[in-house]
Amino acid sequence: MSVEDLLRYYPNKYIDRTRVYKVQELEEGMASVQVIGQLLYLYETGIGRRKRLEGVLDDGTGTIRLVWFGGIGHMKKVLQLKSYYVVFGKPSLFREEMTMSHPEISLYQGAEALASQSRLHPAYPMTEAMRNGGVTSALLEQLILSAFQHLRMEDVPDTLPKVLLHKYELMGLYPSLKQIHLPSDNDLLEQARHRLKFEELFYVQLEILDYAHKRTRSSAGLRFPLVGSVFHLFYREHLPFALTEAQKRVVREIWADMNSGLQMNRLLQGDVGSGKTLVALMSMLIAQGNGYQSCMMAPTEILAEQHYNTLMRFLEGMDIHVALLTGSVQGKRRTSILQEVSRGEVNILVGTHALLGDKVDFHQLGLAVIDEQHRFGVEQRASLWKKNSISPHILVMTATPIPRTLAMTVYGDLTVSVIDELPPGRKPVKTCHGYHETEKDYLQLVASEIQKGRQAYFVYPLIEESEKSDMLDLESGYQHLCEVFPQWRIGRLHGKMKDSEKNSIMEEFKAGKMDVLVSTTVIEVGVDVPNASVMVVMNANRFGLSQLHQLRGRVGRGADQSYCLLVTGYQLSETSRRRIEIMLESSDGFYIAEEDLKLRGPGVLDGTQQSGVFFDLKLSNVIRDGDLMAQARNAAMDILSQDPDKSLPSYAIVWDTLAKMRKNRIDLSNIS
């Protein structure tokens, strides 16, 4: 470990040794505190492994019991009755007596000596290997203290230019590192943390924006100057309903990208039911109007078929050739489609990862639409770019709302469009909380809807009963519903079924040949059955907010009032109860996504990646520090615009630091 590594190994908390507490002030649940008193008694108790050393400390306002379960022989040698000691530890109540187990204890040597040691002490995260090697938090503190006794300001050159330090009122690097390890007071500590967080977020954003800048400059794109007659015909005569203002805005943004002469890389966000597929279709019609083919890639066969059927319904009566290519399409049919694609006879090809195969040879691919792109690996997505001599335009779609703070990081190199309106006529889904113990109440609502000719989903977290879990399971739920409602036509669907079987069941449900579909979360994304008006989520407390929101989005797709019933037991954890509350109070996917992040923490950026960027965030947090990240992003954008060729001496430190970080980091570009 170098000195720089040591200085960049930040404390994860601080121990406040600036205050001495009185025993009468101590309460259960307090953090570690410092007390000074006289050691009145010291005695051993218990036998064998239960042997312990106990002492009683009196500070004049009361007594506290001190307990040691180990190192008893050593403690007996060094502790002296009637002497005054400084003890530090976490107070707790044991049999109505204030107790401190394994406190730090040192001889009290007067107010002056205590004052010299009274400050915020850093506590460092310890790994098992560090503990086994004899490395302690106190040892790290001593090493860092020694390092600062020998280091000078000029030994620690700043990583940020003076213009940024001045503009954003940031502390310099040397004092920041010193204060974060050896804080003088809370105010200076907070200034140091602010500066070091800004630095982390600034370089993350600079990396992302620099990557996007390079790609923009090097990625020539196909130019689509025409909207085209096909687009106009569809818009005038085949559009099933009026576009929302949000949809119109996004179509204009996409066309502007495709006419810029640079490759489009745009992320299209839209909540469930917001009309992303229609926007994607109109974008593909622009490509066709300029003489190019398009493809739409989905992560599952069910979703690919859903898109294919939706496009065919939209384009009914138009002379546009749409084909479907999935793993299930084999033999002569597959050969025929591949030949038609290579001859340019297929205008729009819809499929799964089968589109990425070497045998899929487009005549002229101009636009690739990727749905729920986080389910595809980086290399898979990049292989689409090679389907044309000039890389096709890329439109990435997701129905999973991405919080602003996460979007700036995970999708920071993409241009973002958001459809933030639902099509007219859609009624908000009514969300209710039910209990397993009162099954009759929620089944009555389901029965009422089915009597009206509607359909319902029942979603379970497990397929089969498990000895390791008390969760309800699909198979038991299916049998139970069949017994209670023998008149219902009930089907079941789960991920262990073959694709052909899953597709067949979904087609039957969509055709109205089933009243109820009992399923796992395989129907979470993309399934569109307008006649389904009830979603019952069993053991809803076992699902994340994002999943619950996606499941709710499977209903409310028609003009009728729809319902989402979240069913749990009476006993819920605080987190589970909060999830249910959020679902009951809001249907805004972006709000729900923000709240989900707050509950879960950023953790691993689930299912997402950023090309070549390593998120080594030691201090900052993409949730709590969203405003600071936006500030850091603006700073990075300013520097890139002022010094695009990286030649200005005033910014040399920035590019040198970024190059050093790139050299040392782990490349996550192949992780998805």
Image (spheres, grey):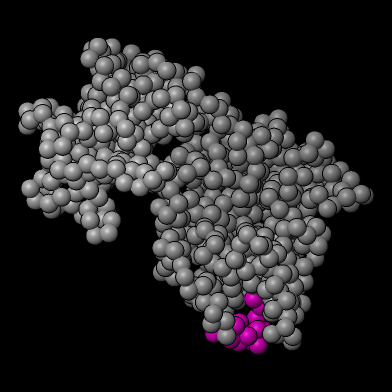
Residue lying furthest front in this view? 47
The residue drawn where x is 41% and y is 63% is 574
Residue 221 appears at what percent x and percent y? 60, 33
Task: Relative to 197, say whether 148 is above or below.
Answer: above
Q: Main secondary structure of the magenta part?
A: helix
Task: Relative to 39, say whether 403 is above or below.
Answer: below
Magenta residues, as a range?
441-456
Quarter of image, res 634: top left
Which corner quadrant holds the N terminus? top left
Q: Is residue 290 visible?
A: no
Direction from residue 488 to residue 574 in the image, left or right:
left
User: Is 209 or 79 nearer to us in this picture?
Assistant: 79
Direction from residue 51 to residue 181 in the image, left or right:
left
Task: Relative to 387, say whether 666 is above or below.
Answer: above
Quarter of image, res 469: bottom right
Residue 667 appears at what percent x and percent y? 55, 27
